[in-house]
Image (tube, rainbow, N blue to C red):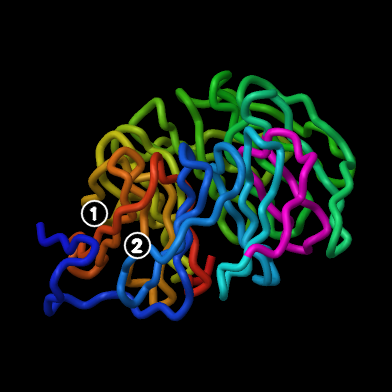
Amino acid sequence: MPVRAQGGPATAAAEPVLRHPVFVLNSLDADVSVIDPVSWTELRRIPTGKEPHHLYLTPDERSLIVANALSDSLTFLDPKTAEVQRTVRGIVDPYQLQFSPDMKWFVTAANRLNHVDIYRWDGQELTLAKRVATARTPSHLWIDSKSRTVYSSMQDSDELVAIDLQTQTIKWRTRTGPMPADVFVTPDDRTLFLGLTGGDGVEVFDISGAEPRLLKKIPTGKGAHAFRTAGDGRHVYVSNRVANTISKIDWQSQQVVASYPAPGGPDCMDVSADGRYILVTSRWARKLTVIDTQTRQVVRQVKVGKSPHGVWTLDHARR
């Protein structure tokens, strides 16, 4: 498997053409690596707060928000220049975060404290609307396209919860397989995919009715964890952290159609604007890994910090 390491010699292999920085969260270093996508070197580190695990680009793409779980804060970055815009404090245990598509709601999952916080957003300030007690260890979030429902996985009680954003109350909860993690919902808001980090695949739910209905389980690999759409309106990737692979799922047929090697404990992903390259954090190897989906090979690895988690670039495929 050809791998180009940081600072290594150039080869004839194609590489993604990106114009803006790539950001990688280093959860155990309390900072963000800013990577130059031309030289593929780490330009600098941005101090954040303790345990930054996830980041989210606002729907207007003006700010990249880093959630610092143990520091109870959010760091706003300029996704074009990598400059710090501001720090918002008093956001309790923001492990995972999501903006509603209409940008009226901002939701965080308090992984340590067993609740989901729903904030109103006026374009500048966050105001807590409701703290919703959930179950053990809320992990990943997804908000539907109509900005009506937030879905949250419960990592340690093996549940999936749906919360009504208007009333800030739980609509339903359902049992899942072991250690549910990331959530992906199809654009029509009818089908939900759930990665099972404690298992070896993805559960598929019909969420079109008043109650969820389990449709099937898709085998992908041990430690199925994080999702990222391919940008083509039909496929979604899932990282299999223990299997060291990434699976490509056709969400219409609900089947795996391709698999890619992803060494070092693959975690969060982003996809280049042309859809060809996957950028994935290799959690246990302290690297950012770039995978060519056409050749199904690793074409670049960049050394970053301890326990790299979230990754993002403005030059992304459609989500």
Q: Which residue is mark 1?
A: 260
Residue 218, percent from left and from top: 37, 40
Depicted 157 relative to depicted 152: above or below: above
Relative to 193, 244 lies left or right: left
The mark nearer the N terminus, 1 or 2, is 1
The answer to whether any part of residue 264 appears in the image is: yes
Q: Which residue is mark 2?
A: 278
Q: Amino acid at mark 1?
A: Tyr
Please tell me the numbered disc located at residue 236. Answer: none
Labels 1 & 2 near each other (Cβ < 8 A): yes
**Label tally:** 2
Residue 151 inside the magenta-drawn segment: no
Q: Amino acid at mark 2?
A: Ile
Rendered residue at 61%/51% (across/down): 66
Q: Quadrant of the N terminus?
A: bottom left
Q: Which residues are magenta?
A: 84-109
- How far is the residue under mark 1 from the one under mark 2? 10 Å
- Graded by Cα atoms within 10 Å as few (under 14), some (14 to 19) or many (20 or more), the crowding at tag 2 reads many
Residue 187, percent from left and from top: 59, 61
The residue mark sitting in front, 1 or 2, is 2
Depicted 258 relative to depicted 226: above or below: below
Relative to 129, 164 lies left or right: left
Badge 1 marks a residue whose secondary structure is strand
Rendered residue at 23%/46% (across/down): 263
Rendered residue at 61%/56% (across/down): 56
Residue 69, percent from left and from top: 63, 36
- Graded by Cα atoms within 10 Å as few (under 14), some (14 to 19) or many (20 or more), the crowding at tag 1 reads many
Residue 102 inside the magenta-drawn segment: yes
Viewer-proximal residue among 35 and 168 = 35
